[in-house]
Amino acid sequence: MSHYAIVVPPLYSHIRAMEALAMALSARGHHLTFVLPPDALTPDDARVQLCPGLPEAILQAQRRMQNPANRALWRIANTMAALTDALCHELPALLRTLRVDGVIVDQMEPAGSLVSESLGLPFVSVACALPINREPHLPLSVMPFAWGEDEKSQRLYRGSERVYDLIMRPLYRALDAHSRRLGLTPRDRPDRCLSPLAQIAQWAQSLDFPRYALPESFHYIGALRGPAVGTASALPEGALNVSPLGYASLGTLQKHPYLQLRRMAAACRRAGVNVMITHCNTLSPDEIAGLYRSGATWVEAFIDQPAFIQYADVVVSHAGLNTVLETVAAARPLLMVPMAFDQPAIAARIVHHGLGRRVSRYAASATMARQIGALLDDEGARARLQAASRALAACGGAARGAEIVEQALTTGRPVLRTAAS
């Protein structure tokens, strides 16, 4: 079968999503090589491997990206530009050495697209976060704004886009320079580097803002999820025998969320919710004790999050894409406390569809408690969540994504929504 390279940012949620896609492709007989640092992968699959002998320039740029401080608003453009530089210089030789038949490229790693095109390799774009495809009437996928077609909203979208593009100029300059150096038509933004063969997004049309200009080769495929990797602790005794049951987490990207988690714990206590809080090994023993004092019923570093959410009556989270998809899949009401990155934009879309509520990261526990109570009493939201859950399941997930990737990279022809097999 075929051998595909996977170019993805060295970020936990992006890697896990691409792993799920890789495992689905492996099940179809393909070999996958990730361009990532050592120890980045979790699957035990002989067909899914890391690139041997990754050049030091790429490793240094990836380590820089992994440092949360370098992903702050005023640093992210230079951080991404550095990784683009390293990949555009080193990836051509790597892909030739690997003798790959095609490339799977995260939308947020546009160097993979430029290099693939320059080598004549077919490539597919994958949105592991919200899709970056732009449309004139839409807020960017990193903006927190609600949907609106009125002139005030449209001015807000246009103004925020100009500011964002100013901030991202270091990356745009790098893309423009490398596209010219590689002999390609000049392009200066990641959304101008997307595959003409197929673009897949782990999101759903039923969760997005209205879109009118997506290419016919764009496919919503729902959640990219694989089997459990065995790192979660067992569910605590009695957790599934209480009601109402809550789950609260700030995901994997927040460095020290202690004060926010304390407010969440206190809010759940006020609302009468027995809450499980996970912290991804970010808290000290004293901080864990503080969460119990504030109102947590259980505190764990990790649990089997999708399994626990299936039983929860309410979920309180940072609006990370994976947690949101798992919550919608389980048709559970969601209180979102967006913290960073595309989380405010994800929250805006969930609120737009009436599937959850949103509060500021600075909201007091009393404010959060009122919203939790409102969610528990909202029969209309439950009905909408059931419909959204069915729509998400119908997208096909990793298995459907693997079909589209295989078809695009095998035939070298666009895979259209109306004709995808």
Image (spheres, rainbow, N blue to C red):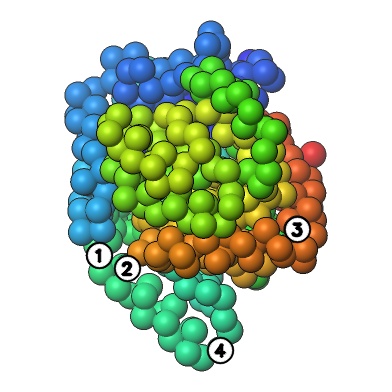
Q: Amino acid at mark 1?
A: Ile
Nearer to the camera, 206 or 357: 357
Helix or strand or loop: what does disc 3 sit on?
helix
Apparent side of residue 103 relative to residue 222 in the rendered image (left or right)? left
The answer for how far apart the CA atoms under marks 1 and 2 are is 5 Å
- For badge 3, the amino acid type reads Arg
Circle 4 residue:
150
- Rounded to the nearest whole Å, what is the CA distance between mark 2 and mark 3? 36 Å
**Label 4 sits on what residue type?**
Asp
Indicate which disc, 2 or 4, sits on the residue closer to the N terminus.
Answer: 4
- Secondary element under disc 4, as helix, strand or loop, is loop
Q: Are marks 2 and 4 in contact (CB under 8 Å)?
A: no
Picture quarter with the N terminus:
top right
Residue 244 position, x and y percent, is 66, 47
Q: Can you identify the residue that label 1 sits on?
A: 167
Quick check: 5 left or right of 339? right
> Is 308 located above or below residue 394 in the figure?
above
The residue singled out by tag 3 in the image is: 382
Tell me the element at label 1: helix
Q: Residue at x 43, y 61 (%)?
A: 365
- Residue 219 in percent (x, y) is at 66, 50
Q: Is residue 127 left or right of residue 8?
A: right
Distance from Cα at disc 3 to Cα at disc 1: 40 Å
Of all residues, the one furthest to the bottom in this rendering is: 151
Residue at image coords 54%, 43%: 275
Q: Is residue 125 above or below residue 349?
A: above
Q: Foreground: 102 or 22?
A: 22
- The answer to whether residue 420 of the structure is visible from this angle is no
| Contact (Cβ within 8 Å) of mark 3 with mark 4 | no
Residue that carries the numbered disc 2 in the rendered image: 164
Between disc 2 and disc 3, the foreground one is 3
Q: In the rendered structure, which disc, 3 or 4, sits on the residue that comes first in sequence? A: 4
